Amino acid sequence: MTLRRAGLLLLLLAALGALAAYGTLQRWLDTPLAIGATAVEIDIPRGQSLAATARELEARGILEHPRWLQAFARTTGADARIKAGEYAIAPGTTPRGLLALFESGAVVQHSVTIVEGWTFRDLRAALEKEPHLDNALAGRTTQP
């Protein structure tokens, strides 16, 4: 076998390997995550990297191959468009859909009902009871 044929054979094998890796990645991106029957919530704090979020999802048994998700997000630019917030990941969500969810900013929204006739003290008491709010005024008095 000549050197030229050996080089072409190596090039062909490398191309086939790259094609197989690409196909495996694409298949993984379209495979549903291991979520179960109910939605899973995850909170992405402001400034947290996708790598940290992917590791958290891996530790919870939801995401397999977190580095693949990071690599795909980096090549598509999705890692720079992820928005902070609390997300509900629905059953059937794929890794590709997960990135789209994190990019969309479609965060979970919680409501608090403000009853007409409440005093400011009543409102603060209701806000302090809400577990999803970070209340910076908790424990402070309303008197000057």
Image (tube, grey):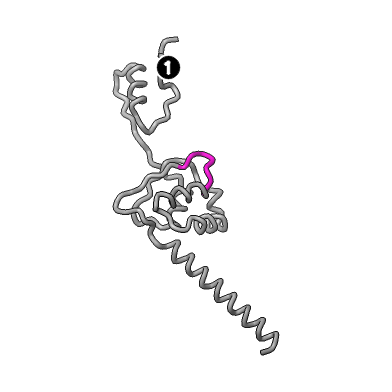
Question: Which residue occupies 47% across, 68% down?
Answer: 24
Q: Is residue 3 above or below residue 21?
A: below
| Residue 97 location (% of width, % of height) | 43, 55
Residue annotated with mark 1? 140
Q: Is residue 69 above or below residue 123?
A: below
Q: Which residues are magenta?
A: 44-50
Q: Badge 1, how many Cα within 10 Å: few under 14, some, many 20+? A: few
- Classify the position of the C terminus by image quarter: top left
- Classify the position of the N terminus by image quarter: bottom right
Secondary structure type for disc 1:
loop
Question: Which residue occupies 63% across, 78% down?
Answer: 11
Quadrant of the rendered structure where residue 130 is?
top left
Magenta span: helix, strand or loop, mainly? loop
* Residue 37 on the magenta span: no
Report how many numbered discs are placed on residues in the image.
Answer: 1
Residue at the top extreme, as displayed: 144
